Image (cartoon, rainbow, N blue to C red):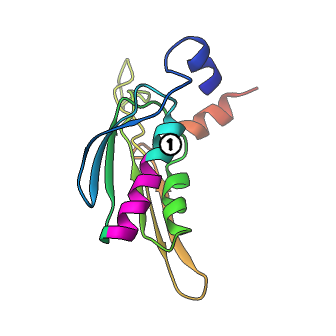
Amino acid sequence: MYVRDVQKNVCKSDGTPIILSERAATAWVDGNNLLGPVVGNFCMDLAIKKAKEAGIGWVVAKGSNHYGIAGWYSLRALKQGLLGMSMTNTSPLCYPTRSAKPALGTNPISLAAPGVNNDSFVLDMASTTVAIGKLSYYKKP
């Protein structure tokens, strides 16, 4: 998917996200239409840095693309001993009941929290009945 998006110029393959506005614990980032994982990792790195310095790190982005598995980003925070949260909106990909066209996005959300004795809690889910990755997996011959 990512290679196709770059080949068709759906997104940029080179560049860096830009911080548009920033405070001690928050930031607004322009992803410059880069690959979603580039923007997602940039934002999570910034959120982790802010959380360690200010006690919380809340970063939002615009101008991004499909960023992959939401849990990847919350787990990055968890590995730093932090509570992690990652979510995004998506394009309409799924059909509501009795609908003739897609109208719902999967809008993934993930939460990760450290526990005791090397245990942790991780939630990674979509707001639709089925995540788009599962549909893609079962669609293949």
**Looking at the image, can residue 67 be seen?**
no
Residue 50 in magenta stretch: yes
Which residue ends up furthest to the top in the rendered image? 8
**Looking at the image, can residue 136 be seen?**
yes
Q: Where in the figure is residue 8, as x and y percent of width and height?
A: 56, 11
Q: Where in the figure is residue 88, as x and y percent of width and height?
A: 38, 42
Identify whether 8 is placed above or below 66: above
- How packed is label 1: few (under 14 Cα within 10 Å), some, or many (20 or more)? few
Q: Where in the figure is residue 42, as x and y percent of width and height?
A: 47, 45
Q: Decide which of 135, 39 is in the foreground and name it.
A: 39
Which residue range is magenta in the image? 43-53
Q: Quadrant of the C terminus?
A: top right
Q: Is residue 135 left or right of residue 105?
A: right
Residue 24 is drawn in which quadrant? bottom left
Residue 48 in magenta stretch: yes
Q: Where in the figure is residue 22, as x and y percent of width and height?
A: 25, 49
Q: Residue at x 58, y 80 (%)?
A: 119
Q: Residue at x 51, y 21 (%)?
A: 12
* Element class at badge 1: loop
